[in-house]
Amino acid sequence: MSFIDDIKAKAKADIKKIVLPETSDIRTLEAASAILAEGFAEVILVGDEGEINSRAKDKGLSVAKAEFINPASSPLLEEFIKLFVELRGAKGMDSAQAKDLLLNNPLYFGVALVRSGKADGMVAGAINATSDVLRAGLQIIGTAKDSKIVSSFFVMVVPNCDFGLNGTFVFADCGLVQNPSAEELAHIAISSAKSFEALTKATPYVGLLSHSTYGSAKHADVDKVIEARDIAKKLAPHIAIDGELQLDAAIVPSVGESKAKGSNVAGKANVLVFPDLDSGNIGYKLVQRLAKAEAYGPITQGMAAPINDLSRGCSAQDIVGVAALTALQAQDTK
């Protein structure tokens, strides 16, 4: 069973309802059709039912088993307008602005469905920028009570790879936090470890990556990673977290033994935490393109409910995969 098939099987154990708001894009409808056929989640499609079904039919797709909600005619509209004003009134949002967002931006109607408990999670980003998807989530869903920072990760599944968990890794943060402080990096490491364990049911080994291993280079950037390690170990002593580690020292047993002797992570890291967004984004795309890895994400962590983003270059199967991960996250959220 592949990684994503395993995730789908786990999702089927406790079916969750996932919102797909970008129904003007055929990839969303292809994904909805596949999700409904596979049966690992229920689907809400935002928009006019007749128009959506017509677009799907033109492509030979069936989405009839989905739930359709048209913001313009939904009895939920007034409820959500009040909700938005309650949540964002102090920031200047009034009823007219709330109504405009809900009627004209499906992302906001989607997150309102999640916030109100009428759905368990949302997947978007095929036709919207990451900043737009996450802004809607942060404004309406907000952070989890036990979270200090909202960050993101990719699940990377590398074919024919003996490293990590049989080629499966969590990479963080590759999509959201631009230049984390030491404290933020520590919280990203802890959240990523929890995400890895929730998704794989395996023990996380967290490598805080750097261009240095155990003092081989001196620089303020290295000092940040070391400080992050110390903070993370203090906050979560039960999690195996170590750094600073170069990539090879983190994942290759022989190199880890040579460069970081005595480390409880070196040579077996399956959660890789990058020091900044530049290195994280470059790193995941290198692995995806050169190693032909499957890349699922960016998946958010730290929100009160799962609102997950897609690359605008995603395929329908990418949407299906992220929807499965979102459904599994929702099992832990509730």
Image (cartoon, grey):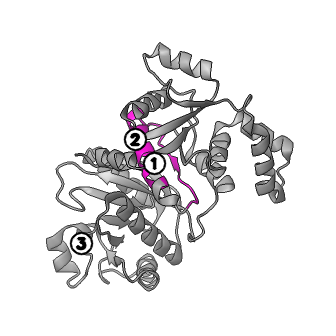
The residue that appears at 56% across and 71% down in the rendered structure is 146
Where in the figure is residue 179, as x and y percent of width and height?
A: 52, 66
Q: Are marks 2 and 3 in contact (CB under 8 Å)?
A: no
Please state which of the two labelled residues, at mark 3 or mark 1, is closer to the viewer: 1
- The question of residue 185 being in magenta is answered with no
Q: Which of 205 and 257 is in front in this view?
A: 205
Q: What stretch is highlighted in magenta?
A: 303-330
Q: What residue type is labelled 2?
A: Phe
The residue that appears at 82% across and 50% down in the rendered structure is 93
The residue that appears at 34% across and 71% down in the rendered structure is 206
Q: Residue 40, labelled with which disc? A: 2
The residue at which mark 1 appears reads as 327
Secondary structure under the numbered disc 2 in the rendered image: loop
The CA distance from mark 2 to mark 3 is: 38 Å
Q: Are marks 1 and 2 in contact (CB under 8 Å)?
A: yes
Q: Nearer the viewer, residue 71 or 107?
A: 71
Say whether residue 25 is left or right of residue 47.
left
Q: Residue furthest top?
A: 58
- The question of residue 323 being in magenta is answered with yes
Q: What residue type is labelled 3?
A: Ala
Secondary structure under the numbered disc 1 in the rendered image: helix
Q: What residue type is labelled 1?
A: Ala
The residue that appears at 35% across and 50% down in the rendered structure is 10
Among numbered discs 1 and 2, the one appearing first in the sequence: 2
Which of the 4 image quadrants contains residue 274? bottom left
The residue at which mark 3 appears reads as 249
The CA distance from mark 1 to mark 2 is: 8 Å
The CA distance from mark 3 to mark 1 is: 34 Å
Say whether residue 163 is left or right of residue 68.
left
